Amino acid sequence: MSLSSFLTKAPRTIVIDASVVINLNATDCAAEILGAVPSPFAVTDNVRAELRFGSRNGHNDEERLKALVDVGAIGGAALDAAGLAIYEALISGSAAMTLDDGEAATIACAVQMNGIAMIDERKARKICASRFGSLPVVSTAELLTDGFTEAALGRQRQIEAIIAALQGARMRVPPEHIEKVVGLIGASNAASCLSLPRTARAAS
């Protein structure tokens, strides 16, 4: 299913993880992309904290997130009692079945809001699917390849945004969306995007 298919009946808050923020920042047109979607976006304090930690290593994603919040492209989200219980369950237990702070908070917040979780990491998506089967989970790649983004940017800028996320932020693309991504950016561009699987890059 595409992002659009989850929003056909009514807008649902889309809670985004740190990797999504980083990918969107790499496109240099995050506000335009987010503004094209008929649904609000939100980020948890846990994700902000992850990005703040990254600023110690010279990354400016926290600062760029603040700019998106200031213009209203992204809102804040806080966990309530039910969300905190889900969050605690997701960070407790064996390493194979737990998530990092930001991913856990993103999923918990999306569940409590009856929203949509936007997460790229395979492990987080797998755990989310097994524990919260009714929660829609989408990736940055789905947002960037969606018709919303094409309508906002035009096809050429959409392609440039996808390449920027792949090359600048090493965006991870779920296996089921690799063909669509490569089809949009072309095999020659895909060959230089190291975050894509080798088989996808070798197609050129």
Image (tube, rainbow, N blue to C red):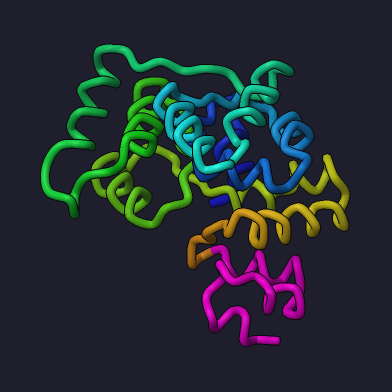
How many numbered marks appear? 0
Q: Which residues are magenta?
A: 177-204
* Quarter of image, res 71: top right
Describe residue 19's horizontal placement relative to residue 105 as left or right.
right
Residue at image position (50%, 26%) is 43
Describe residue 145's horizontal placement relative to residue 22 as left or right.
right
Residue at image position (76%, 33%) is 36
Q: Is residue 184 above or below residue 106?
A: below
Percent position (x, y) of residue 163?
72, 61
Q: Is residue 24 above or below residue 160?
A: above
Percent position (x, y) of residue 64?
66, 31
Q: Is residue 146 above or below residue 182?
A: above
Task: Work out whether residue 3 or residue 25 is closer to the camera in this orientation and state it.
Answer: 25
Residue at image position (11%, 42%) is 93
Question: Mainly helix, strand or loop, the magenta region?
Answer: helix
Q: Is residue 196 magenta?
A: yes
Task: Work out whether residue 44 or residue 81 is closer to the camera in this orientation and state it.
Answer: 44
Describe residue 41's horizontal placement relative to residue 164 as left or right.
left
Q: Is residue 130 magenta?
A: no
* Quarter of image, res 68: top right
